Image (tube, rainbow, N blue to C red):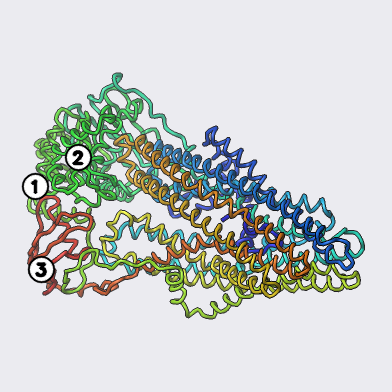
């Protein structure tokens, strides 16, 4: 969490986090060596043919470019951070000098026959202790200024970058946005941007501090003894070679594993997005097995890395104690030969080098973060730097929209499939002020014409080449594509010959002006569009209608005047009749994609949104497809009224809606085959239109209502597999009892206990943890014994010195065995356990009742993120973090025991005065850091969902000219985040600075009181240094534990979420049982059924009684919102009735 807590005072215990960070040093080289880092990362991406695209390299220049989004104020803050970080980093190398002088004074005082008096010794200790106090105060203020300034600038710059990305995205043509999934946008704005933010804030300051620390420590060591410094650095090549050999295969395994996990996450997202369809067809088990197969492959591959992880956890510790052995042996040799003045010099050199080596990992950690940020920034800059089409052009008064729209010899292919031609030499005119209807079989190009008139696509050969390579998809986004367009592409794929790329030719004109010369935003402001599948934003009904005023002169009107326009538009669209019945009226939230409204209600809101600005051009793309018969007639009358004196283009499958059109155009396979009025076209007996009309004669009458209900059922997608016999329903849709949150032991510990069959791995891990934790108390004892050697006569000094130096060698070998055992065992446990719970998590989620998915917080994106992040948190904690936290506990207990064995007075001072300060600072720091992170996550999550929703509805956004409004709203969200985060950072940074420097204060206290005890000769050197080292080690252990506390808290929350998804009641089967096939059918009966949706207070069904006999054909009819789809949903058991009974076969 911080760069300077765990590796500062001599001698330092090497946490596994340090070992891992040192291991990751090789990753910096790996990133630098990749020729096409971004493209290679995408080569396995199922989203599209990234291999064929060259993506910009993820160079460090992109990291430095991020800072260009800062202001002059930000640069002042960054400069101030750099200066104070350097000052903060040099504090501990200077402390080492003071420590060496103290060690020299202690040993000199206890040499037999010394001339130093107790008063002189005490005065020297007081003087040197005061230096430590000065360093403590300086480091506190320097750390505070450093971290606060860089956090402020990092938040501001990150917000500016996110905003630039979103604005650049919506500046792209539809041909580019078509290739980008909302999930990837969400990832860019959250994960990628968060990676960049950390690298330009905390990690930036840590890099300066750590570099200064390492350089300063080596400068001090070389000044004292250059030769001894080189000998003490012998472990550095060993560490680099070991990691250089182990890291590449580890990363190869990791990349393959990530690919499998990405595939599993993509599949999970698709399952959550289509949960109603999956449940309706009873496909949960089959899809869950496919998901499990992907996880099995990932686990099988990842287990190969377990031995490598065990090996990578030990080199730093082995190197540390091996260097202790060599350096002490060489230092004693030179001291005995008179080439070193005293033990203080040897101590300063040894600990300066050790601190430098151990802080190399602290340099590597931010460097890796910067390398990752460069890659993340590259992904953002690909979109930001993408060519932006020139949208400026003619507008009023130079041109008017009240003119004919003509297509002249138009040929068109979609950018994602340039080899399949959709329109072939089409000549077509839409006369001003008249209604022109386009009909034809699926795949004839009707919706394509809408896209060209809207200028979603141009005829200039625009393709998806400008799209980020990391985001290319093999097909357009499915969020807003109509069913017709999908069928159109599918049909043409079979029928059309391959024509090669760039088959877009011809002209589209408004009057005599080519449409490409018209200002794009002005042109779209002249069009009102009602699509087949209307998209509503997760906002109020009022705002969803008022969005139709975006980009017009009405946009800036006061809310009161806008409200009048909204109400009038809703009356014209016959939406007011259901809005006024809602408890919150126009303030009703419609849910994600308008899920809280029926299909007909969504369509009427969309119509109101389109006509509110009174556009001169109106495009109706299956505008009444989701409305029941009664409402269709009413709305059709409204559309007939608003289309008068407007250029109206109607796309229709239902020919009954276009009989009164001024002209009907018939398409087939991208060509114009017939045109005329309804009566004229019916006179062509063998014509295409004649055939379509007679094919729909029955459908337009007898089956019209039934088809509408079926369609509404599909669109609202509230259906599930019918279970078994009686559905006794005095339970509500939220009948599951609420899960009670548990602590670490009762949640995370429960998961470990449930997997107790892996007890052999548990035993190996515990043995490794106990042995690794015992290393630190032993180190304190051996170190004190080595220091005491310098008080012995010369003949004893050499022999005893060599013995204790050899003991450090034995400690190095023991450390290797313990860390390897622990690392490998914990990695295997983490892989095995995580596999089980990730699959269980998915199984439990997809078997939740549909009401669960109706919740705004349970969107497919958030559920997929939870599935991935929660199990990842569990795995990370089990793999290394929990083991290191337990080592810290063993270390703390062992150090306290050994310190009391050697002297209770100094131990009490350390235990009750020094340790509480460190514990309090560590606890408060973790708590405030978690609050800071929580604020970040919450606001960025909200802004991410907002951005992803906007991209998912990009056609609606572009049609309504909402790009600027979306950008402004996103900017306001980010500004609110920066303000909140800064307020939190002021206090959390102060605690951070205290915990970052409190160790110097503890050292000052310990040396002063210990010096007092030594002056009176109540303690000897061995007593003091064992206790001192034990107290320092205990403090470090506490710091290590708290450094893992945020991760443990996150893993606890993750474990709680996993457990909370388990079925909490047994009112129904945990797995669905399909009904037995029968040719006779079954009876269905509703008895006094009442139902109210959880999200609304208004009852939908009241005392409903229905009986359908076996084999009987029953139809449900009624106005939109009357409960047709709800009835089907209850039959499917998506929901349980609030009261009453639903029976199947009695």
Q: State which mark lies toward you, 3 or 1.
A: 3
Quarter residue 118 falls in: bottom right
Q: Quadrant of residue 518?
A: top left
- The numbered dot on residue 593 is none
Residue lying at 51% horizontally and 69% vertically, measured from the top left:
830
Question: At 57% across and 73% down in the image, what residue appears?
Answer: 825
In space, the residues marked 3 and 1 are separated at their CA atoms by: 27 Å
Mark carried by residue 1085: 3
Binning the other alpha carbons within 10 Å of mark 1 as few (below 14), some (14 to 19) or many (20 upward) gives some
Question: Can you give x and y, in whole percent of width and height, for residue 1038 in the image?
Answer: 58, 64
SS label for mark 1: helix
As displayed, is residue 1145 above or below residue 718?
Answer: below
Name the residue carrying label 2. Answer: 607
Q: Is residue 301 left or right of residue 491?
A: right
What's the mark number on residue 630?
Answer: 1
In whole angstroms, how far apart are the C-alphas of marks 2 and 1? Answer: 16 Å
Q: Residue 522 placed where, x, y %?
A: 31, 28
Picture coordinates of residue 735 (x, y %)?
A: 24, 67
From the viewer's side, name the closer residue of 901 and 334: 901
Q: Position of residue 31 (x, y in %)?
A: 61, 51
Q: Is 226 situated left or right of 247 in this image?
A: right
- 151 and 21: which is toward the camera: 151
């Amino acid at each position: 969490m911080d760069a300077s807590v765990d590796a500062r005072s001599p001698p330092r215990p090497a946490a596994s986090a340090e070992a891992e960070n040192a291991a990751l040093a090789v990753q910096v080289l790996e990133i630098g060596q990749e020729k096409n880092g971004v493209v290679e990362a995408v080569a396995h991406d199922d989203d599209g043919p990234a291999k064929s695209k060259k993506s910009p390299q993820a160079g460090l220049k992109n990291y430095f470019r991020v800072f260009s989004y800062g202001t002059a104020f930000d640069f002042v803050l960054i400069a101030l951070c750099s200066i104070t970080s350097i000052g903060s980093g040099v504090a501990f190398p200077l402390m080492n000098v003071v420590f060496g002088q103290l060690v020299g004074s202690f040993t000199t005082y206890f040499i037999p026959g010394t001339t130093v008096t107790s008063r002189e010794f005490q005065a020297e200790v007081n003087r040197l202790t005061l230096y430590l106090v000065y360093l403590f105060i300086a480091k506190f203020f320097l750390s505070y200024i450093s971290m606060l300034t860089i956090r402020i600038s990092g938040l501001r710059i990150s917000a500016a970058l996110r905003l630039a990305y979103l604005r650049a995205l919506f500046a792209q043509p539809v041909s580019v946005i078509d290739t980008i999934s909302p999930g990837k946008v969400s990832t860019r704005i959250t994960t990628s941007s968060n990676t960049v933010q950390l690298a330009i804030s905390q990690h930036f300051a840590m890099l300066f501090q750590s570099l200064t620390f390492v350089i300063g420590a080596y400068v001090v060591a070389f000044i004292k003894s250059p030769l001894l410094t080189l000998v003490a650095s012998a472990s550095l090549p060993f560490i680099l070679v070991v990691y250089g050999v182990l890291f590449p295969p580890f990363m190869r395994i990791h990349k393959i594993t990530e690919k499998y996990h990405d595939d599993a996450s993509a599949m999970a997202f698709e399952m959550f997005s289509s949960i109603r369809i999956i449940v309706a067809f009873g496909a949960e088990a089959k899809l869950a097995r496919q998901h499990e197969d992907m996880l099995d492959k990932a686990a099988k591959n990842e287990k190969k890395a377990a031995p490598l992880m065990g090996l990578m956890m030990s080199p730093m510790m082995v190197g540390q104690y091996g260097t202790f052995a060599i350096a002490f042996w060489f230092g004693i040799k030179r001291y005995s030969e008179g080439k070193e003045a005293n033990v203080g010099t040897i101590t300063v050199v040894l600990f300066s080098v050790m601190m430098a080596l151990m802080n190399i990992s602290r340099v590597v950690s931010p460097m890796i973060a910067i390398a990752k940020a460069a890659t993340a920034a590259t992904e953002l800059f690909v979109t930001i730097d993408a060519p932006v089409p020139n949208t400026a052009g003619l507008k009023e008064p130079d041109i008017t929209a009240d003119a004919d729209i003509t297509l002249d010899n138009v040929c068109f292919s979609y950018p994602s499939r340039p080899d399949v031609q959709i329109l072939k030499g089409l000549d077509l005119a839409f006369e001003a002020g008249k209604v022109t209807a386009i009909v034809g079989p699926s795949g004839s190009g009707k919706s394509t014409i809408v896209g060209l008139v809207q200028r979603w696509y141009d005829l200039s050969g625009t393709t998806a080449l400008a799209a980020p390579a990391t985001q290319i998809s093999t097909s357009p986004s499915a969020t807003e594509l109509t069913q017709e367009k999908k069928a159109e592409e599918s049909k043409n794929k079979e029928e059309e010959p391959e024509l090669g790329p760039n088959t877009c030719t011809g002209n589209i004109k408004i009057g005599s002006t080519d449409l490409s010369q018209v200002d794009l935003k002005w042109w779209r402001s002249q069009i009102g569009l009602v699509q087949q599948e209307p998209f509503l934003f997760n906002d109020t009904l009022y705002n969803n209608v008022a969005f139709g005023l975006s980009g017009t002169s009405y946009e800036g009107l006061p809310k009161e005047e806008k409200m009048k326009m909204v109400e009038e538009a809703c009356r014209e669209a016959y939406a007011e009749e259901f809005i006024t019945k809602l408890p919150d009226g126009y303030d009703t939230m419609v849910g994600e994609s308008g899920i809280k409204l029926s299909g007909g209600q969504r369509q009427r809101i969309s119509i109101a949104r389109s006509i509110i600005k009174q556009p001169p051009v109106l495009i109706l793309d299956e505008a009444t497809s989701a409305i029941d018969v009664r409402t269709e007639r009413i709305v059709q009358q409204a559309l007939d009224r608003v289309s008068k004196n407007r250029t109206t283009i109607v796309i229709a499958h239902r020919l009954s809606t276009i009989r009164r059109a001024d002209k009907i155009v018939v398409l087939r396979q991208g060509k114009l085959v017939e045109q005329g009025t309804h009566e004229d076209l019916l006179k062509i007996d063998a014509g295409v239109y004649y055939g379509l009309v007679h094919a729909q004669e029955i459908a337009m009458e007898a089956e019209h209502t039934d088809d509408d209900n079926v369609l509404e059922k599909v669109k609202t997608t509230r259906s599930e597999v019918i279970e078994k016999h009686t559905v006794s329903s005095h339970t509500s849709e939220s009948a599951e009892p609420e899960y009670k949150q548990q602590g670490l032991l009762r949640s995370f510990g429960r998961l470990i206990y449930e997997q107790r069959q892996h007890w052999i791995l548990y035993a190996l891990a515990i043995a490794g943890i106990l042995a690794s934790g015992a290393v630190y108390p032993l180190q304190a004892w051996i170190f004190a014994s080595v220091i005491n050697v310098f008080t012995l006569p010369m003949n004893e000094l050499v022999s005893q010195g060599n013995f204790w130096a050899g003991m450090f060698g034995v400690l190095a070998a023991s450390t290797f065995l313990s860390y390897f055992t622990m690392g490998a065992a914990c990695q295997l446990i983490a892989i095995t356990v995580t596999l089980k719970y990730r699959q269980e998590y998915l199984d439990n989620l997809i078997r939740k009742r549909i009401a669960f998915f109706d919740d705004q917080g349970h969107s497919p994106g958030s559920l997929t993120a939870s599935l991935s992040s929660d199990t990842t948190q569990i795995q990370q904690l089990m793999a290394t973090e929990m083991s290191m936290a337990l080592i810290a506990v063993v270390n703390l207990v062992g150090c306290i025991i050994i310190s009391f064995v050697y002297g209770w007075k100094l131990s009490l001072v350390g235990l009750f005065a020094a340790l509480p300060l460190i514990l309090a600072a560590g606890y408060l720091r973790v708590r405030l850091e978690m609050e800071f992170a929580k604020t970040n996550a919450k606001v960025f999550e909200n802004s991410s969902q907002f951005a992803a929703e906007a991209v998912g509805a990009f056609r609606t956004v572009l049609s309504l000219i909402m790009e600027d409004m979306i950008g402004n709203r996103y900017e306001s969200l980010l500004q609110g985040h920066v303000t909140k985060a800064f307020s939190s950072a002021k206090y959390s940074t102060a605690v951070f600075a205290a915990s970052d420097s409190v160790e110097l204060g503890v050292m000052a206290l310990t040396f002063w009181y210990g010096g007092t005890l030594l002056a009176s000769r109540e303690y000897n050197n061995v007593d003091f240094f064992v206790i001192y080292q034990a107290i320092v080690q205990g403090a470090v252990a506490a710091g290590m534990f708290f450094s893992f506390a945020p991760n443990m808290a996150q893993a606890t929350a993750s474990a709680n979420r996993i457990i909370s998804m388990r079925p909490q009641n047994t009112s129904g089967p945990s797995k669905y049982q399909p009904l037995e096939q029968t040719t006779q059918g079954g009876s269905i009966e509703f008895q006094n059924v009442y139902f109210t949706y959880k999200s609304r207070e208004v009852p939908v069904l009241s005392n409903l009684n229905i009986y359908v006999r076996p084999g009987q054909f029953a139809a449900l009819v009624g106005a939109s919102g009357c409960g047709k789809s709800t009835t089907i949903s209850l039959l499917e058991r998506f929901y349980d009735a609030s009261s009453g009974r639903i029976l199947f076969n009695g």
